[in-house]
């Protein structure tokens, strides 16, 4: 008997958590957090209270024999330390994932303190998670528990990200985590040398979408950046801290953009961790050169200097959906100037400040609605596969059963139809559902 219980990210994106259960084993894939928008309520209401909150996956009563973490993004890693409150399960991941997750976990504690909220875990649990970690190399099979083997393959999504294959009871279970199919400036895309598997748990974020060619999107951003620089304007690039910030740094270098480039926020620490892992890159040397051209904004004094500057500049900063972070100060300072441009470079969840700015031209700053006079553009550089690329992976590993997760419900239902038309048996569990695999 092998069962899969969906603890989170069932017909939703965020708080991933999937429990594999047999008569003797409980093995967990990921344990993330879902971040809910800070400013809820009507977009045009004048002043509202801010309340940022995070949602956990369902709790686990069983003793965990192993925890496997696919990558460091908050929706997968965010609540891992919580698991170390009562037990000390073995944690399997890559070294890069642990380094990046650690930055995120500590930041979560900082945000909780700022919001005057009780976090789901404390520093002690982060330390215990660290002590319980086993780093696995890519493509090396390890016995993680009696009669259970695990192999990691490069998922091409961020530094450290993996596609996992579990072997138990003569069956192979693959969990894709988040993966990227197409080559980006930084990464080559996922390792195609994957085994055939029996059960495939796969992300379906863009299961009903066809992505525009990546290079076209990159050119759009570059042309827009050049247009603003020529007018001596500022370009504020809203970017997620892990991967997007570093990709934009590489993009500016690739096209030899000459204006000063500043990076502010958590993306700085992340870039430094990226430098420790050359094995994930297409061209590590070029990435290093790109980093060397950046001015990192390490303290308020340097930030003040940039905020007072009247020269053209590119500012790459967080939060990617404008839910706080240093970007708010830059928008406050430069948003009134029509020569400024704000470019949103990632997916904007409904209800977030970024989505609000894109759709209504307004955003909340310090609890007040603010309407910048500058241009706002959205060019989303996705790090996920589109429908065609998802189907390519399915064809490659030829599963007997497919479990679609990590996608909005309408996308998941659409993608299920597509897979069923190709003759596959498909499950799309909701949070709390259990599926019998064997
Ligand atoms: Zn991710
Ligand atoms: Zn994800």
Image (cartoon, rainbow, N blue to C red):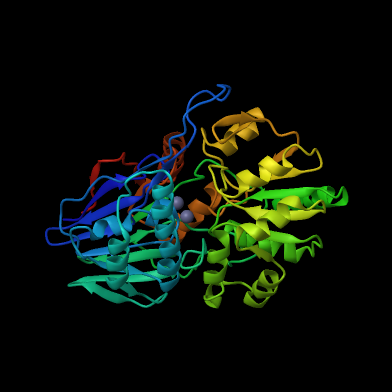
**Extreme residue in the front direction:** 301
Left or right: residue 307 compared with residue 388: right
Say which quadrant the C terminus sits in: bottom left
Residue placed at 45% from the left, 62% from the top? 103
Q: Is residue 379 visible?
A: no
Residue 385, percent across and down?
Answer: 53, 52
**Extreme residue in the left direction:** 23
Q: Is residue 256 visible?
A: yes
Front one among 302 and 348? 302
Left or right: residue 89 compared with residue 335: left
Left or right: residue 167 compared with residue 291: left
Front one among 331 and 436? 331
Residue 10, percent across and down?
Answer: 35, 42
Residue 333, percent across and down?
Answer: 70, 43
Say which quadrant the N terminus sits in: bottom left
Residue placed at 29% from the left, 66% from the top? 129
Front one among 167 and 308? 308
Residue 182, percent across and down?
Answer: 59, 59
């Amino acid at each position: 008997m092998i069962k899969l219980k969906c603890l989170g990210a069932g017909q939703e994106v965020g708080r991933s958590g999937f429990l594999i259960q047999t008569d003797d084993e409980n093995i967990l894939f990921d344990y993330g957090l879902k971040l809910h928008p800070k400013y809820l309520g009507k977009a045009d209401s004048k002043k509202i209270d801010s309340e940022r909150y995070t949602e956990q996956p369902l709790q686990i009563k069983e003793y965990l024999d192993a925890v496997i973490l696919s990558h460091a993004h908050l929706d997968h890693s965010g609540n891992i330390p919580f698991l170390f409150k009562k037990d000390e399960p073995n944690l399997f991941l890559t070294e890069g994932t642990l380094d990046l997750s650690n930055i995120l976990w500590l930041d979560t504690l900082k945000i909780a303190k700022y919001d005057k909220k009780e976090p789901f875990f404390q520093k002690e649990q982060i330390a215990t998670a660290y002590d319980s970690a086993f780093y696995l190399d890519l493509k090396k099979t390890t016995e993680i528990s009696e009669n259970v083997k695990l192999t990691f393959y490069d998922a091409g999504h961020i530094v450290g990200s993996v596609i996992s294959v579990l072997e138990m009871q003569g069956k192979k279970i693959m969990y894709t985590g988040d993966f990227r199919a197409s080559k980006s400036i930084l990464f080559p895309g996922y390792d195609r040398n994957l085994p055939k598997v029996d059960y495939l748990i796969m992300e379906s974020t863009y299961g009903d979408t066809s992505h525009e060619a990546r290079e076209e999107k990159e050119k759009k951003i570059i042309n827009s950046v050049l247009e603003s620089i020529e007018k001596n304007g500022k370009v504020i690039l809203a970017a997620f801290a892990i991967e997007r910030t570093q990709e934009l740094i590489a993009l500016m270098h690739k096209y030899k953009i000459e204006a000063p480039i500043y990076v502010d926020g958590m993306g700085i620490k992340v870039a430094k961790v990226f430098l420790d892992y050359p094995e994930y890159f297409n061209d590590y040397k070029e990435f290093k050169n790109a980093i060397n051209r950046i001015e990192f904004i390490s303290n308020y004094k340097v930030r003040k200097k940039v905020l007072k500057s009247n020269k053209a500049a590119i500012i790459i900063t967080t939060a990617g959906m404008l839910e706080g972070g240093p970007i708010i100060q830059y928008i406050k300072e430069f948003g009134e100037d029509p020569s400024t441009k704000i470019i949103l470079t990632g997916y904007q969840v409904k209800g977030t400040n970024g989505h609000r700015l894109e759709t209504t031209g307004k955003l909340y700053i310090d609890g007040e609605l603010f309407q910048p006079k500058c241009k706002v553009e959205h060019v989303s550089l996705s790090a996920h596969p589109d429908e065609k690329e998802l189907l390519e992976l399915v064809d490659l590993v030829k599963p007997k059963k497919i479990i679609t997760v990590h996608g909005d419900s309408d996308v998941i239902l659409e993608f299920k139809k597509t897979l069923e038309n190709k003759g596959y048996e498909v499950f799309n569990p909701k949070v709390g559902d259990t599926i019998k695999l064997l």
